[in-house]
Amino acid sequence: AQSVTQLDSHVSVSEGTPVLLRCNYSSSYSPSLFWYVQHPNKGLQLLLKYTSAATLVKGINGFEAEFKKSETSFHLTKPSAHMSDAAEYFCVVTPPGGTYKYIFGTGTRLKVLA
Amino acid sequence: GAVVSQHPSWVICKSGTSVKIECRSLDFQATTMFWYRQFPKQSLMLMATSNEGSKATYEQGVEKDKFLINHASLTLSTLTVTSAHPEDSSFYICSARTRPRTGGRQPQHFGDGTRLSIL
Protein backbone atom coordinates (compact mmCIF):
# COMPACT_ATOMS: atom_id res chain seq x y z
CA ALA A 1 0.00 0.00 0.00
CA GLN A 2 1.12 3.51 -0.75
CA SER A 3 1.36 6.19 1.89
CA VAL A 4 3.05 9.50 2.47
CA THR A 5 4.12 11.11 5.74
CA GLN A 6 4.88 14.75 6.23
CA LEU A 7 6.96 14.81 9.36
CA ASP A 8 6.21 18.36 10.47
CA SER A 9 2.76 19.90 10.70
CA HIS A 10 4.24 23.39 11.23
CA VAL A 11 7.57 24.90 10.23
CA SER A 12 8.71 28.44 11.03
CA VAL A 13 11.70 30.09 9.39
CA SER A 14 13.02 33.61 9.21
CA GLU A 15 12.92 35.46 5.91
CA GLY A 16 16.11 34.82 3.95
CA THR A 17 16.93 31.52 5.68
CA PRO A 18 16.67 28.04 4.14
CA VAL A 19 13.45 26.07 4.06
CA LEU A 20 13.24 22.30 4.57
CA LEU A 21 9.89 20.52 4.45
CA ARG A 22 10.16 16.80 5.01
CA CYS A 23 8.27 14.04 3.25
CA ASN A 24 8.67 10.28 3.44
CA TYR A 25 6.77 7.82 1.32
CA SER A 26 5.96 4.16 1.36
CA SER A 27 5.60 2.43 -1.97
CA SER A 28 5.96 -1.07 -3.32
CA TYR A 29 6.84 0.26 -6.74
CA SER A 30 8.59 3.25 -8.20
CA PRO A 31 6.23 6.08 -7.34
CA SER A 32 5.47 9.43 -8.85
CA LEU A 33 5.81 12.18 -6.28
CA PHE A 34 4.61 15.77 -6.25
CA TRP A 35 4.78 18.85 -4.07
CA TYR A 36 1.90 21.33 -4.11
CA VAL A 37 1.41 24.64 -2.34
CA GLN A 38 -1.92 26.01 -1.15
CA HIS A 39 -2.47 29.62 -0.16
CA PRO A 40 -5.51 30.48 2.00
CA ASN A 41 -8.85 29.93 0.27
CA LYS A 42 -7.12 28.83 -2.90
CA GLY A 43 -6.63 25.60 -4.79
CA LEU A 44 -3.35 23.75 -5.03
CA GLN A 45 -0.50 24.90 -7.24
CA LEU A 46 2.04 22.39 -8.53
CA LEU A 47 5.57 23.19 -7.36
CA LEU A 48 7.40 20.23 -8.83
CA LYS A 49 7.10 16.56 -9.75
CA TYR A 50 9.26 13.45 -9.77
CA THR A 51 8.42 10.76 -12.31
CA SER A 52 11.53 8.52 -12.37
CA ALA A 53 13.77 10.84 -14.36
CA ALA A 54 16.40 12.97 -12.58
CA THR A 55 16.44 12.49 -8.82
CA LEU A 56 16.99 16.20 -8.16
CA VAL A 57 13.92 18.04 -9.32
CA LYS A 58 13.77 21.79 -9.74
CA GLY A 59 10.44 23.51 -9.44
CA ILE A 60 8.94 26.95 -9.53
CA ASN A 61 9.74 29.85 -7.21
CA GLY A 62 13.20 28.49 -6.34
CA PHE A 63 11.99 25.25 -4.77
CA GLU A 64 13.61 21.91 -5.40
CA ALA A 65 13.32 18.38 -4.06
CA GLU A 66 15.54 15.33 -4.10
CA PHE A 67 14.22 11.82 -4.51
CA LYS A 68 16.22 9.44 -2.30
CA LYS A 69 15.12 5.87 -2.80
CA SER A 70 17.36 4.49 -0.05
CA GLU A 71 15.73 6.83 2.46
CA THR A 72 12.26 6.77 0.84
CA SER A 73 12.27 10.54 1.09
CA PHE A 74 11.31 13.47 -1.09
CA HIS A 75 12.12 16.55 0.97
CA LEU A 76 11.34 20.02 -0.35
CA THR A 77 13.95 22.75 0.00
CA LYS A 78 14.51 26.38 -0.85
CA PRO A 79 17.74 28.28 -0.18
CA SER A 80 16.12 31.51 0.96
CA ALA A 81 12.57 31.95 2.23
CA HIS A 82 10.37 34.85 1.13
CA MET A 83 7.36 36.18 3.00
CA SER A 84 5.22 35.06 0.05
CA ASP A 85 6.23 31.43 0.68
CA ALA A 86 4.02 31.31 3.78
CA ALA A 87 1.36 28.73 2.91
CA GLU A 88 0.35 25.09 3.31
CA TYR A 89 2.47 22.53 1.48
CA PHE A 90 1.32 19.05 0.49
CA CYS A 91 3.46 16.10 -0.51
CA VAL A 92 1.62 13.69 -2.79
CA VAL A 93 2.34 10.18 -4.06
CA THR A 94 0.62 8.46 -6.94
CA PRO A 95 0.54 4.69 -6.96
CA PRO A 96 1.10 2.74 -10.18
CA GLY A 97 -1.93 1.61 -12.10
CA GLY A 98 -4.65 3.26 -14.07
CA THR A 99 -6.53 5.38 -11.56
CA TYR A 100 -3.74 7.88 -10.84
CA LYS A 101 -5.41 8.78 -7.59
CA TYR A 102 -3.43 11.06 -5.35
CA ILE A 103 -2.45 10.08 -1.85
CA PHE A 104 -1.94 13.26 0.14
CA GLY A 105 0.25 13.94 3.10
CA THR A 106 -1.35 15.77 6.00
CA GLY A 107 0.29 19.03 5.02
CA THR A 108 2.94 21.33 6.49
CA ARG A 109 2.12 24.91 7.31
CA LEU A 110 5.10 27.13 6.60
CA LYS A 111 5.37 30.37 8.51
CA VAL A 112 7.93 32.97 7.43
CA LEU A 113 9.01 35.48 10.05
CA ALA A 114 10.14 38.97 9.14
CA GLY B 1 -0.64 26.27 -19.50
CA ALA B 2 -2.80 23.72 -17.65
CA VAL B 3 -5.29 26.17 -16.20
CA VAL B 4 -8.37 24.91 -14.38
CA SER B 5 -11.18 27.33 -13.69
CA GLN B 6 -13.68 26.64 -10.93
CA HIS B 7 -16.89 28.62 -10.49
CA PRO B 8 -18.30 29.99 -8.29
CA SER B 9 -15.57 30.76 -5.78
CA TRP B 10 -18.04 31.51 -2.98
CA VAL B 11 -21.67 30.55 -2.54
CA ILE B 12 -24.04 31.07 0.36
CA CYS B 13 -27.47 29.55 0.19
CA LYS B 14 -30.37 28.36 2.31
CA SER B 15 -30.74 24.85 3.58
CA GLY B 16 -32.62 22.61 1.17
CA THR B 17 -31.44 24.23 -2.04
CA SER B 18 -29.20 22.61 -4.64
CA VAL B 19 -25.90 24.12 -5.65
CA LYS B 20 -23.95 23.47 -8.85
CA ILE B 21 -20.19 23.96 -9.06
CA GLU B 22 -18.43 24.03 -12.42
CA CYS B 23 -14.90 22.93 -13.20
CA ARG B 24 -13.38 23.75 -16.58
CA SER B 25 -10.02 22.96 -18.10
CA LEU B 26 -9.24 26.07 -20.14
CA ASP B 27 -6.27 25.07 -22.27
CA PHE B 28 -6.19 21.29 -22.29
CA GLN B 29 -8.53 18.34 -22.60
CA ALA B 30 -9.20 16.70 -19.27
CA THR B 31 -9.76 12.99 -19.66
CA THR B 32 -10.16 12.67 -15.90
CA MET B 33 -11.45 15.11 -13.32
CA PHE B 34 -11.43 14.73 -9.56
CA TRP B 35 -13.59 16.32 -6.88
CA TYR B 36 -12.24 16.88 -3.40
CA ARG B 37 -13.58 18.21 -0.15
CA GLN B 38 -11.37 19.98 2.35
CA PHE B 39 -12.21 20.66 5.98
CA PRO B 40 -10.49 23.50 7.83
CA LYS B 41 -6.81 22.88 8.50
CA GLN B 42 -6.99 19.42 6.95
CA SER B 43 -5.79 17.73 3.82
CA LEU B 44 -7.97 17.06 0.79
CA MET B 45 -10.43 14.21 0.80
CA LEU B 46 -11.19 12.64 -2.57
CA MET B 47 -14.92 12.44 -3.19
CA ALA B 48 -15.09 11.04 -6.70
CA THR B 49 -13.28 10.50 -9.97
CA SER B 50 -14.96 11.20 -13.26
CA ASN B 51 -13.92 10.26 -16.75
CA GLU B 52 -15.41 12.02 -19.75
CA GLY B 53 -18.51 10.30 -21.02
CA SER B 54 -18.83 7.78 -18.21
CA LYS B 55 -20.29 7.61 -14.73
CA ALA B 56 -18.28 8.94 -11.85
CA THR B 57 -16.60 6.60 -9.41
CA TYR B 58 -17.36 7.63 -5.84
CA GLU B 59 -15.17 7.00 -2.82
CA GLN B 60 -16.49 4.94 0.03
CA GLY B 61 -18.81 6.92 2.25
CA VAL B 62 -19.67 9.58 -0.33
CA GLU B 63 -23.39 9.70 -1.13
CA LYS B 64 -23.93 9.47 -4.86
CA ASP B 65 -27.41 10.93 -4.68
CA LYS B 66 -26.22 13.87 -2.59
CA PHE B 67 -23.22 14.76 -4.74
CA LEU B 68 -24.11 14.47 -8.42
CA ILE B 69 -21.20 14.58 -10.82
CA ASN B 70 -21.41 15.08 -14.55
CA HIS B 71 -18.46 15.05 -16.96
CA ALA B 72 -20.16 15.64 -20.27
CA SER B 73 -17.19 17.01 -22.20
CA LEU B 74 -13.41 16.95 -22.13
CA THR B 75 -13.33 20.44 -20.65
CA LEU B 76 -16.22 20.54 -18.19
CA SER B 77 -17.27 18.66 -15.08
CA THR B 78 -19.95 19.73 -12.64
CA LEU B 79 -20.66 18.85 -9.04
CA THR B 80 -24.20 19.40 -7.79
CA VAL B 81 -24.83 19.31 -4.06
CA THR B 82 -28.49 18.38 -3.84
CA SER B 83 -30.75 19.48 -0.99
CA ALA B 84 -27.78 21.02 0.78
CA HIS B 85 -27.69 21.19 4.56
CA PRO B 86 -25.33 22.98 6.96
CA GLU B 87 -23.17 19.88 7.33
CA ASP B 88 -22.40 20.11 3.60
CA SER B 89 -20.67 23.45 4.17
CA SER B 90 -17.07 23.04 3.15
CA PHE B 91 -14.37 23.95 0.65
CA TYR B 92 -14.76 21.95 -2.56
CA ILE B 93 -11.86 21.68 -5.01
CA CYS B 94 -11.73 20.12 -8.45
CA SER B 95 -8.72 18.97 -10.39
CA ALA B 96 -8.12 17.76 -13.91
CA ARG B 97 -5.53 15.73 -15.71
CA THR B 98 -4.94 14.58 -19.22
CA ARG B 99 -3.73 11.28 -20.61
CA PRO B 100 0.04 11.29 -20.94
CA ARG B 101 1.41 11.21 -24.47
CA THR B 102 4.67 9.68 -23.30
CA GLY B 103 5.75 7.73 -20.25
CA GLY B 104 5.35 9.17 -16.79
CA ARG B 105 2.41 10.58 -14.91
CA GLN B 106 0.69 13.75 -15.78
CA PRO B 107 0.02 15.81 -12.64
CA GLN B 108 -3.38 16.95 -11.58
CA HIS B 109 -4.09 20.65 -12.03
CA PHE B 110 -6.36 22.21 -9.46
CA GLY B 111 -9.06 24.83 -9.55
CA ASP B 112 -9.16 27.60 -6.95
CA GLY B 113 -11.92 25.93 -4.99
CA THR B 114 -15.46 26.83 -4.00
CA ARG B 115 -16.35 27.89 -0.46
CA LEU B 116 -19.88 26.60 0.16
CA SER B 117 -21.83 27.90 3.16
CA ILE B 118 -25.29 26.54 3.87
CA LEU B 119 -27.41 28.57 6.27
Image (spheres, coloured by chain):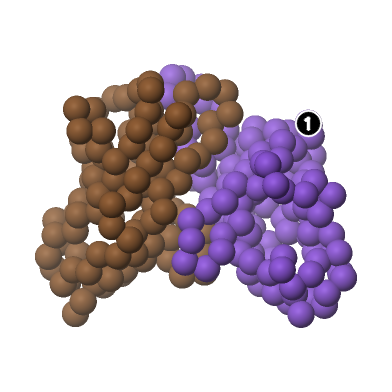
Q: Colour of chain B?
A: purple
User: Mark 1 = which residue?
Assistant: B54
Point 19% across, 27% down: residue? A70
Task: Answer left or right for A52 relative to B37.
Answer: left
Task: Answer left or right for A56 relative to B86.
Answer: left
Identify the subunit bearing mark 1. Answer: B
Location of residue A24 (image quadrant) = top left
- On the question of residue B3 being in view, the answer is no
Any idea which chain is the brown one in this picture? A
SS of the residue under disc 1: loop
Tell me residue A14's x, y (percent).
16, 72
Point 70% across, 47% down: residue? B61
- Residue B100, placed above or below residue B40: above
- Residue B15, placed above or below residue A5: below
Point 60% across, 47% down: residue? B46
Type of amino acid under label 1: Ser
- On the question of residue B23 being in view, the answer is yes
Tell me residue B41's x, y (percent).
47, 66
Mark 1 Cα-neighbour bin, 10 Å: few <14, some 14–19, many ≥20: few
Tell me residue B115's x, y (percent).
63, 69
Tell me residue A86's x, y (percent).
31, 68
Point 81% across, 66% down: residue? B84
Foreground residue among B101 and A81: A81
Figure quadrant of the C terminus of chain B: bottom right
Foreground residue among A75 and A84: A75
